Image: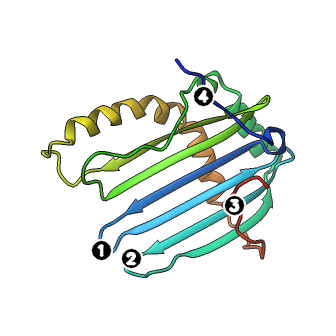
């Protein structure tokens, strides 16, 4: 199994970068993206983008806050787990055929002088009978192990995301490390 590490110039400046996104291309679909950049001291930068079709633009909310000691400890335990460390590298990929609804969850975790990139994607196809269905099914099967292993991190992310946070005047960084 390939180790999921990639070189990064600033691996010690953050604890994790976590992102969830959804694209729904139906006429009244929602495109959403939420990300959080967590620093070693528990400070975090979070962004939420939401576009409800047919509206042509998205709304953006940016938050700056700090995790509780318990939240930070939970995150460190999840990130240091053997299940997390053993996941394959997640790289964006094209899903064959018509797929109007898709979601992706991804995390970047500094490991020594490298960054581990893990994640998974899920989707709903418009038809299960088209010629691309076998390729989609094989790809979906390959995502299941990562999806299962990442459930504790996904739950942690949703718990933090569901907090009542006060928007900040901070500019968007797309949760990237500067």
Going from N to C along the chain, the mark reached first, 3 or 2, is: 3
Residue annotated with mark 2: 53
Crowding at mark 3 (Cα within 10 Å: few <14, some 14-19, many 20+): many
Q: Say what secondary structure mark 2 lies in.
A: loop
Helix, strand or loop for disc 4: loop
First in sequence: mark 4 vs mark 3: 4
How packed mark 4 is, by other alpha carbons closer than 10 Å (few <14, some 14-19, many 20 or more), is some
Q: Is residue 159 above or below residue 83?
A: below
Q: Are marks 2 and 1 in contact (CB under 8 Å)?
A: yes
> Which residue is denoted by mark 4 in the rendering?
4
Q: Distance of mark 4 from mark 3, alpha carbons? A: 24 Å
Q: Position of residue 90 (x, y in %)?
A: 52, 36
Using the numbered discs, state the Cα–Cα distance from disc 2 to disc 1 in whole angstroms: 6 Å
* Residue displayed at 83% across by 45% down: 13
Q: Marks 4/2: CA distance?
A: 36 Å
* Residue corresponding to mark 1: 27
Q: Measuring 64% from the left and 21% from the top, which residue is drawn there?
A: 82
Outermost residue toward the left in this view: 129
- The residue to which callout 3 is attached is 46
């Amino acid at each position: 199994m390939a180790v999921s590490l990639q070189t990064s110039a600033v691996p010690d400046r953050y604890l994790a970068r976590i992102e969830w996104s959804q694209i729904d291309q139906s006429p009244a679909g929602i495109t959403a993206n939420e990300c959080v950049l967590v620093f070693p001291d528990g400070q975090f930068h979070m962004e939420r983008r939401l576009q409800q079709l047919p509206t042509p633009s998205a709304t953006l909310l940016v938050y700056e806050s700090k995790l509780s000691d318990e939240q930070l400890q939970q995150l460190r335990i999840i990130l240091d787990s053997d299940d997390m460390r053993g996941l394959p590298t997640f790289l964006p990929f094209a899903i064959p055929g018509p797929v109007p609804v898709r979601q992706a969850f991804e995390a970047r975790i500094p490991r020594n002088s490298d960054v581990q990139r893990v994640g998974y994607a899920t989707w709903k196809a418009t038809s299960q009978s088209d010629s691309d269905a076998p390729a989609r099914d094989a790809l979906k099967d390959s995502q299941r192990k990562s999806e299962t292993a990442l459930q504790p991190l996904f739950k942690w992310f949703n718990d933090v995301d569901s907090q009542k946070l006060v928007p900040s005047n901070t500019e968007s960084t797309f949760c990237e490390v500067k």
